[in-house]
Amino acid sequence: MNVSILITAYKEPGTIGPAMEAFITQLPEDSEIIVVCPDPETTAVVHQYAHRYPYIRHVRDPQKGKPAALNIALHTVRGRLVVLSDGDVQVGENALVTLLAPFQDRRVGAVSGHPVSVNSRQTLLGYWSHLLTDSIHQMRLHRDTKRKFLLCSGYFFAVRRELINRVPEDALAEDAVISHLIAQQGYQIRYSPESLVYVKYPTSYRDWLKQKVRSAGGYAQDYLRSSPYRMRSARLEFLQGAKPALTYPRSLKEFGWSLLLFSARLHLWALVWFNVRVRHLPLGTLWQRVETTK
């Protein structure tokens, strides 16, 4: 089998259907879609699709965290290439073929897609989401051109199956851990800017912190702190992100929102340091469901 699409979901019956349909219309021949989820509502939707499309399978998630769910699903996939995505996002038209194209080069171990915010830029948090996605897009373009190490986006990326045996089950940023594992084996990570994935970002500051603490918190764990590939930290974020944040605004209002983002990021990294490095809170405590992204 050529490709396995691996989608993780939790209590997302309203979005898992469109997420699968976006892949169904562009799935290569002799491939499969696997959905890992624990809740009966989402599972029921997956089973409905599985009756219509025999290449769709459901794998039960024991609800021990996303890395544990990935490990279980990785043992069941049949494809040489595994595409990872989430149940609350939707890939764009032709996104899959462009994501898989770089694998014709055997030196390529993983390819990242291109997240695009669907939030309104006319709100504070919506503006932050556009600033984030556009800045990271430019950074990935630059690093891809220079063939430098880059991080895959957990919303949509693909890897060679033989390069991943297991994801640490307490990893907060499993996409970053996988990226580092690929690079440490001597493989390139490429960026596919045409492989769009549409993402709804948090619309409340509380949810924004929940989401960012668990993702940024991964970089405070030893898996990434000890890696020779450094692409993200509070220090690097300030050095590399200050200029884009100050040049991105189109108006005085947006400039003010950029300044507020500096304070929000300081708040975020302080929470990461305290909760991950000092309190050593477990995955189950740090990984909190974000309702406003559904």
Image: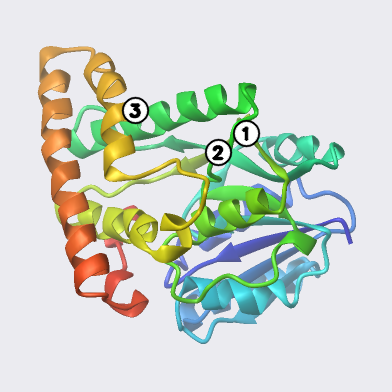
Quadrant occupied by the N terminus: bottom right
Q: In screen coordinates, is 134 left or right of 151?
A: left
Q: Quadrant where the C terminus lies?
A: bottom left
Question: In the picture provided, is 81 more to the left or to the right than 118?
Answer: right
Kind of element beneath mark 2: loop
Amino acid type at image mark 2: Leu
- Determine whether the residue tagged by mark 1 lies in a helix, strand or loop: strand
First in residue order: circle 2 vs circle 1: 2
Cα separation between marks 3 and 1: 19 Å
- What is the three-letter code of the residue carrying label 3? Gln
Instruction: Residue 240: give its label.
Output: 3
In the rendered structure, are the residues bearing label 3 and label 1 in contact, judged by CB atoms less than 8 Å apart? Answer: no
User: Mark 3, mark 1: which one is toward the viewer?
Assistant: 3
Q: Tell whether label 1 touches label 2 (CB within 8 Å).
A: yes
Name the mark on residue 191: 1
In the rendered structure, are the residues bearing label 3 and label 2 in contact, judged by CB atoms less than 8 Å apart?
no
The tally of labels here is: 3
Amino acid residing under circle 1: Tyr
State the residue at coordinates (64%, 32%). Answer: 192
- Report the disc number at residue 48: none
